[in-house]
Amino acid sequence: MPRQMIGLDIGQTAVRGAQLRITRGGITVTRYHEVSLPHGVVSQGDVLDAPTLVAALQQLYDEGDFTTRQARLSIGNRHVYVREHSVKRVPLTMLKSSLRYQIDDVLPLDPDKAVLDYFPASLSVTGGQPTYTGLLVAAETEPLEALAQAIHKAKLRLTGVDLSAFALLRALDPTRPTAGADGQGSGNALDRVLTDLIIDFGAGTTQIVAVHGIRPLAVRMLPSGGDDITEVLQSVDDAAFGEAEAAKASTGYLGGLAQTPAEQAIAAGVDRLVSAISDTITFFHNTTPDLEHIDRVIITGGGSRMPGLQQHLVDLLGLPVYLGQPLQGLRFASAEAESYAYDHLSTCAVALGTMEN
Ligand SMILES: Nc1ncnc2c1ncn2[C@@H]1O[C@H](COP(=O)(O)OP(=O)(O)OP(=O)(O)O)[C@@H](O)[C@H]1O
Ligand SMILES: [Mg+2]
């Protein structure tokens, strides 16, 4: 029997589900659906209005015509921390059970109030000792439990939690074989040795993932996103949130050409966000020995659709910037599922990439 599961993304603006059929032959997307969330239901991973979130998840299940209730959730917000961490090689189970004693030096978190995990990325010999280099992940328990409770109340069975940064790199994996081709590996060997920087422009969170081939090197979650720009615009224009959203999308980023107060507010908001992204890239370069250089930038998330943003990133970072293509090489069970996902190209990556490693 093929295994089916729903990859779930609870974002600030929508809940998204991708039902995946997993067989030895590969992964097929059998369903994809999204349901919008009103402003203020979820904020940076905090559930502010649980009944509305539960209703949206139920609506997602019903409208999306899902046939399994097994769901795996991806998380990536200000309550989730990822740090590059090297540690002496011991059996992985032993390593994971000792994480609570290691986070003291790495993160300002109470280990009793967090779920911890470790993902080794490479093994080397340092000072004669076999040493793992990898990512230490810590998620605060309380906000995660609120999300789990909403999922449970919507009558879905939560089978696991994933880091949305990992979901992004799976969904945007340039080495994925093309659909229909039975051969293994990438059509393009170059993709295996390039280093990409994935930037997910969300509403409350901007995620940045440095990845070499499909090996994650560094991950950061910035606690700001498109909503911050909309909120400033709302006060400048004295408009409702929805009106400010529409004005932001139609005006876009005008940079130095911005003239009206609204245009200038958008440009300033984007400049702030992009400057934080720039600082993160510098930080990655200074702290991640395996990150020698970045070859390309891949952008995704609703905010990546802002007119003018892609060119601005090219100018500022001096790197090629591509829109993420999460459907490339992916098999769909029906044209309907594929075309729905295509209509949500900028926001479907996290749900589509949510699966066990
Ligand atoms: N055409 C557009 N131009 C500018 N911004 C846009 C456009 N379309 C969507 N956005 C912005 O994208 C953001 C939503 O992105 P997305 O749907 O990826 O976020 P989310 O996943 O719901 O939130 P988060 O990941 O932060 O929890 C909003 O701030 C929205 O204003
Ligand atoms: Mg998101």
Image (cartoon, rainbow, N blue to C red):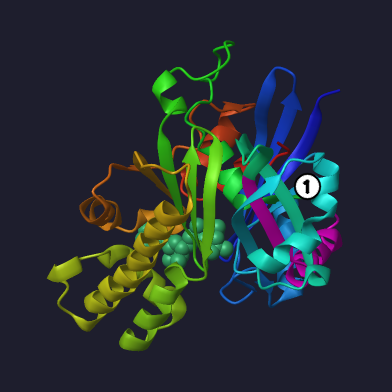
Q: Identify the image quadrant of the N terminus.
A: top right
Q: Is residue 97 above or below residue 250?
A: above
Residue 89 position within the rendered picture, expressed as x and y whole percent measured from the top left? 74, 40
Query: As shown in the figure, which amino acid type bears the numbered disc 1?
Result: Ala
Residue 200 position within the rendered picture, expressed as x and y whole percent measured from the top left? 47, 54
Location of residue 19 (image quadrant)? top right
Q: Label 1: few (<14), some or many (≥20) within 10 Å?
A: many
The residue depicted at 70 percent of the width and 34 percent of the height is 20
Q: Across the whole image, how many numbered discs are drawn on residues? A: 1
The residue depicted at 65 percent of the width and 37 percent of the height is 128
Please say whether residue 64 is visible from this viewpoint. no
Span shown in magenta? 134-158
User: Is 142 covered by the magenta stretch?
Assistant: yes
User: Is 72 covered by the magenta stretch?
Assistant: no
Regarding mark 1 in the picture, which secondary structure is present there? strand
Residue 205 position within the rendered picture, expressed as x and y whole percent measured from the top left? 52, 65
Viewer-closest of 124 and 232: 124
Q: Is residue 125 above or below residue 145?
A: above
Location of residue 137 (image quadrant)? bottom right
Viewer-closest of 20 and 145: 145
Q: Is residue 99 above or below residue 276?
A: above
299 sits left or right of 33 in the view: left
Viewer-closest of 113 and 162: 113
Task: Kindly identify which residue carries mark 1.
Answer: 71
